[in-house]
């Protein structure tokens, strides 16, 4: 048993799709969430910058009493790759492995689509992770760089004409290939799930990287007897690098309601301090 918190970070608020599922599966766990809202997006940046930011995010998370770190960001997970699985004493996971395991188990026709940010798709990391499990799968990758700004700006309704148009533009080639499983390889994308589902049709299974990772972490902690011992509800603490008020306000579309914890702003000086 281990009462320390689970540390979760993302470039912004996308990782809240993972937190939502963590809270659902393990309501007694404490969560420390860090969203680098002042520097989002990561997905349009180069590899060195993403690694530098991720290292700072991890260092901040490690200042807290934590028992596991989750990079709830498809971009960071892809750039770091599956090689980063543990960090001396603190277990670490990105979203890649849990997500591709779920997709490989789901596909029937062996055609898996992967959508993500530019950096994620360029890295080819999801494809490599899929092939490490199943070599017989056809993979169709597509970067969808406008999805994150759509989500961040509230264009999330399935009937919103702007959202519909962008979804169709990006997903047309993926749909044409006849995939039966689609990995939402960026933790922001589940917020667009209704629009994506509507376009792809009911025959296509959508795999959310955030919630698959939460399921993986729950199984991981359970197997190692690392779950919290407390019987009362766990506490969520949120940290971000831009306005705390804006974080709490915007978080509502990710949580489906009011944010369940206090938000504190972290200065960039504190984050970058050696
Ligand atoms: N949540 C990030 C991801 O999962 C996307 C946002 C970004 O580009 O930083 O890739």
Image (cartoon, helix red, strand yellow):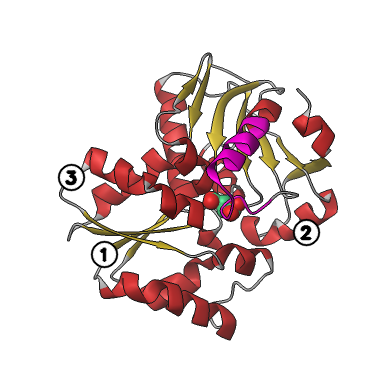
Q: Does the residue labelled 1 lie within 8 Å of ligand 1?
A: no
Query: Residue 3: where, in percent of width, then height?
Result: 62, 20
Q: Does the residue labelled 3 lie within 8 Å of ligand 1?
A: no
Q: Considering depth in this image, is 80 or 194 the residue closer to the camera? A: 80
Q: Quadrant of residue 19?
A: top right
Image position of 99 with respect to 249: above or below: above
Label number found at residue 135: 3
Image position of 194 with respect to 141: above or below: below
Query: Residue 40: where, in percent of width, then height?
Result: 67, 52
* Mark pair 3, 1: CA separation: 17 Å
Query: Residue 106: where, in percent of width, then height?
Result: 26, 53
| Viewer-nearest of discs 3 and 1 | 3
For disc 2, the neighbor class at 10 Å (few under 14, some 14 to 19, many from 20) is few
Q: Considering depth in this image, is 38 or 63 the residue closer to the camera? A: 38
User: Which residue is denoted by mark 1 in the rendering?
Assistant: 180
> Which secondary structure is most common in the magenta stretch?
helix
Q: Mark 1 or 2 closer to N-term?
A: 1
The residue positioned 46% from the left and 33% from the top of the image is 218
Label number found at residue 249: 2
């Amino acid at each position: 048993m281990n009462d320390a918190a689970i540390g979760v970070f993302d470039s912004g608020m996308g990782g809240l799709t993972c937190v939502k599922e963590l809270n659902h599966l393990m309501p007694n766990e404490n969560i420390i969430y860090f969203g680098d809202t002042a520097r989002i997006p990561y997905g349009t940046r180069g590899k060195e910058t993403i690694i530098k930011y991720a290292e700072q995010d991890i260092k901040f998370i490690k200042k807290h009493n934590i028992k596991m770190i989750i990079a709830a960001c498809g971009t960071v997970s892809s750039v770091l790759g599956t090689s980063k699985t543990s960090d001396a004493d603190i277990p670490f996971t990105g979203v890649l492995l849990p997500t591709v395991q779920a997709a490989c188990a789901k596909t029937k026709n062996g055609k898996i689509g992967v959508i993500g940010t530019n950096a994620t798709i360029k890295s080819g990391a999801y494809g490599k992770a899929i092939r490490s499990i199943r070599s017989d799968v056809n993979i169709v990758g597509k970067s969808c760089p406008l999805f994150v700004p759509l989500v961040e700006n509230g264009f999330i309704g399935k009937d919103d004409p702007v959202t519909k148009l962008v979804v169709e533009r990006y997903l047309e080639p993926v749909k044409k290939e006849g995939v039966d499983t689609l990995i939402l390889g960026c933790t922001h994308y589940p917020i667009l799930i209704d629009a994506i589902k509507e376009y792809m049709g009911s025959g296509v299974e959508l795999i959310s990287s955030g919630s698959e990772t939460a399921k993986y972490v729950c199984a991981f902690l359970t197997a190692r007897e690392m779950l919290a011992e407390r019987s009362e509800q766990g506490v969520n603490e949120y940290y971000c690098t831009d306005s705390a008020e804006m974080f709490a306000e915007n978080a509502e579309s990710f949580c489906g309601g009011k944010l369940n914890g206090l938000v504190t702003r972290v200065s960039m000086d504190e984050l970058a301090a050696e």
